[in-house]
Amino acid sequence: MTTVLDVAVVGAGINGATAALFLARGGMRVALLDRGQICRQASGVNAGTLTMQMTRRALIPFALEAHAMWASAAEWLGHDVGVVVCDGLSLAFTDGEAQLLSERVAARREAGAPIDLVDGKRAQAIEPGVSDKVLLAGHCKVDGYANAYLTGLAFRRALEREGVAIMENRPVTGADRAQGAWALLTPEGTIRAKRVVLAGGVWLEDMASWFGCAIPIKVLINQLAVTERMPVAMRTVLGIASGLLSLKQYPHGTVVIGGGWQGLGDRVAGPRAVIPENLVGNVRLACHAVPALERSRIVRAWLGLEAETADALPAVGALPGVEDVAMVGSIHSGYTSGLSIARHFARWLLGAPLHPGIAAFDPARLVVRPGAR
């Protein structure tokens, strides 16, 4: 490509697709590149949970904004993405979990999250399907989930309408700077742009290395499973204080089981294998939380990649010491707050002041200097 674009966004997950969309709506000529397809890598295998209960305190204001964006996706994105807005419960079954839950709820409430602590009986009144062994629960009315498959379709249509050059299955292997622009190197040729946005999630570490920056990114290989269709077992999004469980039942009856149970894989090879004992542990915990699940069967299990920085907060802003390169990525619980953060990021690139809360996510804090450990 000989044309010099205003910006090339590398990574077409939730963060990259959102940034590209709002940059195009702001008048920029934008290309969106991805090693796979739009919202089909880490974002495409995500459970799509939109919960305040497991969101980092610093991200709560953005999670609230993003929740409103998801709820109105048909208006600004132009297509329904299967968002279900419902109550959410984070459950505690032991004294230790109850203590942890109380501390986390207090911290999130200070940041503005509308979460209340309720006892086990109240939790059962809110969600009759939960176990009678619940001691304490965090209850949030601002919860829900999105459909990852429909999200990718909606973003594709919106990006096409705004004239974004979509370049799927187009891995970038490096970058050079010449004549005041960046040249992104791909097997199909060079893409030239005045600015580059890195939105690679788990691949952000490799992307930063193209520009001589070392930013370590931890890769989580989260295991998920889905049941066969079954009668209504829950109408809320459920989790557990330890973070090892997330549950939601889709309108057609299947239940998605997720949480912090890990599988095998890495950023190079991608997901490789489910760890059977971890899958069994996750399913047992799900049945402990919602006994009706004991009457259902698992029909599929898979792995989803999630990125995490050293402090578990996003990397958003200019790449230190590199002209005209910025990043927006590695947002833990990216579905929950990514839309809002990426929109603020795009406004900044378009000339607005950087949102004060996002300034705290400066990538410079994550750079490892040569010789440092």
Image (spheres, rainbow, N blue to C red):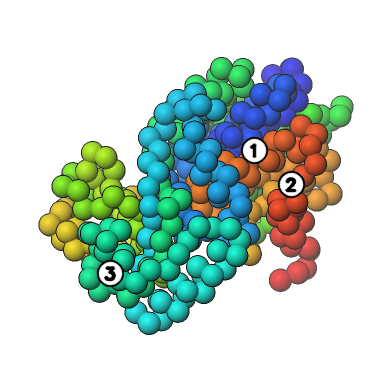
Q: Residue furthest right?
A: 179
Of callouts 2 and 3, which one flags the residue occurring earlier in the amino acid sequence?
3
**Measured from the top left, where is residue 301 in percent x and y?**
29, 51
Of callouts 3 and 1, which one flags the residue occurring earlier in the amino acid sequence?
3
Q: Which residue is mark 2?
A: 355
In the figure, is residue 87 to the left or right of 297? right
In 3D space, how far apart are the residues under numbered discs 2 and 3 (Cα atoms)? 41 Å
In the figure, is residue 357 to the left or right of 158? right
Q: Which mark is residue 121?
A: 3
Q: Residue at x 72, y 35 (%)?
A: 347
Q: Residue at x 23, y 38 (%)?
A: 252
Q: Amino acid at mark 1?
A: Arg
Q: Which residue is mark 1?
A: 343
Q: Residue furthest left?
A: 295
Of callouts 1 and 2, which one flags the residue occurring earlier in the amino acid sequence?
1
Q: Amino acid at mark 2?
A: His
Q: Secondary structure at mark 2?
A: loop
**Residue 95, above or below 176:** below
Q: Which mark is residue 272?
A: none
**Residue 214, above or below 120:** above
Looking at the rendered image, the disc whose residue lies closer to the viewer, 2 or 3, is 3
